[in-house]
Image: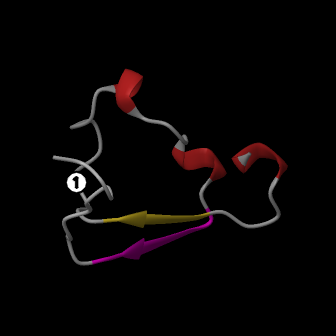
């Protein structure tokens, strides 16, 4: 959906140097991202998970 959006904001927990990520693991290419918001790392849980 990033290609159809007017503005794309990527929420990340860590900013890494260019070239340190596997290109196959990137979901939204940087060319589509307008802003980056760094957020504190948090643990997400799924209700009902064991």
Q: Is 16 left or right of 38, judged from the image as shown?
A: left
Q: Is 50 left or right of 47, judged from the image as shown?
A: left
Q: Residue placed at 21% from the left, 71% from the top?
A: 42
Q: Quadrant of residue 5?
A: bottom right
**According to the image, label 1 marks what residue?**
16
Q: At which x and y percent is residue 34?
A: 62, 65
Task: Look at the numbered disc 1 and give the secondary structure of its residue.
Answer: loop
Q: Is 47 left or right of 11, judged from the image as shown?
A: left
Q: At which x and y percent is residue 14?
A: 23, 62
- Judge by depth and name the residue closer to the eye, 4 or 44: 44
Q: Residue placed at 24% from the left, 48% from the top?
A: 49
- Judge by depth and name the residue closer to the eye, 47 or 3: 47
Q: Specify few, some or many for label 1: CA neighbours under 10 Å numbering under 14, 14-19, or 20 or more.
A: few
**In the rendered structure, does residue 37 fall within the stretch colored magenta?**
yes
Q: Is 37 left or right of 33, judged from the image as shown?
A: left
Q: At which x and y percent is residue 8?
A: 66, 63
Q: In which quadrant is the N terminus drawn?
A: top right
25 in relation to 49, above or below: above
4 in relation to 34, above or below: above
Q: Residue placed at 19% from the left, 65% from the top?
A: 43
Q: At which x and y percent is residue 6?
A: 82, 64
3 in relation to 15, above or below: above
The magenta segment is 34-39
Tally of numbered discs: 1
Q: Residue placed at 15% from the left, 46% from the top?
A: 50
Q: Main secondary structure of the magenta part?
A: strand
**In the rendered structure, does residue 27 fall within the stretch colored magenta?**
no
Q: Residue furthest top?
A: 24
Query: How is colour applied across the structure in the image?
Result: secondary structure
- Judge by depth and name the residue closer to the eye, 4 or 33: 4
């Amino acid at each position: 959906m990033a290609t159809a959006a007017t503005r794309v904001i990527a929420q990340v927990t860590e900013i890494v140097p260019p070239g340190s990520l596997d290109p196959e693991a990137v979901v939204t290419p940087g060319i589509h991202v307008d802003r980056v918001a760094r957020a504190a790392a948090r643990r997400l849980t799924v209700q009902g998970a064991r």
